[in-house]
Structure formats: structure tokens, C-alpha cells
Amino acid sequence: MSESFAKWQECCPEVTRDRDLIDGPKRTLIGRLLAAHAKRQAAWPLLLWGPAGVGKTCAALCLLDYANANRKVFPGWRPAYITAGEWVAVMTAAKLGQYEPSGCRGPISESDLWHWWTVSSVICLDEIGARDKVSDTHYEIVKMSLDRRQGQPLVLVSNLGPTELSRVYDDRIASRMAGGTVVKFVGQDRRVSK
Ligand SMILES: Nc1ncnc2c1ncn2[C@@H]1O[C@H](COP(=O)(O)OP(=O)(O)OP(=O)(O)O)[C@@H](O)[C@H]1O
Ligand SMILES: [Mg+2]
């Protein structure tokens, strides 16, 4: 599969995202997780949650940049970034044999996608819980996605905390999402204060 499927490099290619971008206590928590990961003792997934514009996606991309620069500690395919909505759409199209991104010589199957999902060194699934309700298909794909990366590096990003995730999905999903390392973001919307 083409590496361009994972779009994170395109998000902001001119910027080098250093972990110093992440402030204080959050950087400490993420630094601890990375140190534990190097010793194979990390509590994944990492759930980054908080209101809009506080830097969650930026922090996740810093971590992906770090993983990309430290391939020995993060072996596998290149770090990947995708939103939950895109991932569900792509999986749904693949199930129907209709996922054919440009540059590919034929449709990509559901099993190809699951393979990609399991062999990528780290994946960021962004914008989780962006809608108040999720379809059965969305629920199943997200649940399988969590189960199939159990114990592997996975960064989950949401505007919702564990309690709200439990409302939008259910306790089983929320327990999986919040079962590793949880980092709550607070503060001002950086987009507004720019
Ligand atoms: N540490 C930082 N220093 C400077 N700018 C930052 C920092 N973190 C984020 N930004 C900028 O602030 C804006 C919002 O950041 P980001 O997209 O990461 O927020 P978010 O929490 O993911 O928001 P949303 O919930 O809306 O997706 C972006 O333009 C980003 O480049
Ligand atoms: Mg974001």
C-alpha cells in the first residue's frame, strides 16, 4: 500500500514538531510513556483529550515525528495519522471493494487495511467522538481497531473525556480508550488567541 495513505506528513510539512512544543506536565507524561515504551513497558493507548484548539493534534504529531526519527524504538511501517471519520469511511469502502486510492493498481482490501493497521509503528486516530451518535458500523470498526492494536503504540485524540466517550460509544470502548495513559488538555483555544 502507498505510504501516502498515512497523511500526517502532509499536515504541516514545513514545521519540525519537537516535543518542546508540548508544555509542562503533559510533556512529562508523554516523555514517561516514551521512556517506558523503550523498555517495552508502556501503557498504550495514549488518550489526548480536551477542548478545541488546545494543541492535542499538534502534540500527537510531535509524538509521530519522534517515532519517525526513532525507528529502532518504533519499528514497523511509518507512523500514520488518520481521523476516525476517515478511517471508518475507508474501511467501509474497502469492505465493498471500492477503496482505490490514486496511485494504487487496484482496490485495497479490508484485510490489507487491517494489515496496515497492525504493522504501522504508531498510529494516531484523531477526532474521535466528533459526532453525538455513532453508527453500528462506526462502533464495530473503532472497537476492532482498538482491539487489534492492544498494547501497541496508538494515540487517540478526542474533544471528549472518558465519561463522554462512554456516552457516545459505551463503557467497553471508553474503558479500552482510557485504559492506558490519559492526558487531559486544558487552556485557551490557540486558534482564537493567534
Ligand atoms: N505548543 C504550541 N505552540 C504553538 N502553536 C501551537 C501549539 N500547539 C498547537 N498550536 C497551534 O494551535 C492550533 C490548534 O492546535 P491543534 O490543531 O493541535 O488543536 P486541537 O486541540 O487538536 O484542536 P481541535 O480539537 O479543534 O482539533 C494549530 O494552529 C496549531 O498549529
Ligand atoms: Mg485536533
Image (cartoon, rainbow, N blue to C red):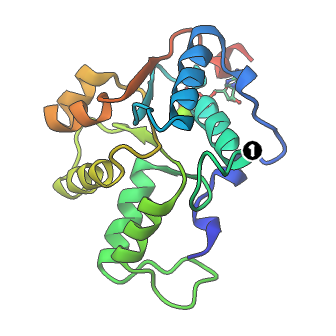
Q: Which residue is mark 1?
A: 12
112 sits left or right of 52 in the view: left
Question: Which image quadrant is residue 102 in?
Answer: bottom right
Amino acid type of the residue tagged 1 in the rendering: Cys
Question: Within 10 Å of the Cα at label 1, are there few (<14), some (14-19), or many (20+) other Cα atoms?
Answer: few
Q: Secondary structure at mark 1?
A: loop
Q: Residue at x 73, y 22 (%)?
A: 21
* Quarter of the image with the N terminus in it: bottom right
Identify the residue shown where x is 20% and y is 29%. Answer: 166
Ligand 2, image quadrant it occupies: top right
What residue sits 27% from the left and 50% below the top?
147
Out of 80 and 127, give the one closest to the viewer: 80
> In which quadrant of the rendered image does the C terminus lie?
top right
x, y percent for residue 81: 55, 50
> Looking at the image, is 146 positioned above or below residue 160?
below
- 28 over 155 or under it: above or below: above
Q: Is residue 21 left or right of residue 166?
A: right
Query: Percent from the top left, x then y, of residue 6?
Result: 59, 59
Q: In the image, is 128 to the left or to the right of 103?
A: left
Residue farthest to the front?
Answer: 39
Q: Position of residue 173 (x, y in %)?
A: 22, 38
Residue sitting farthest toward the bottom: 105
> Is the residue at mark 1 in contact range of ligand 1, meaning its CB lies under 8 Å from it?
yes
Residue 75: x %, y % from top left: 59, 55
Whether residue 75 is visible, yes or no, is yes
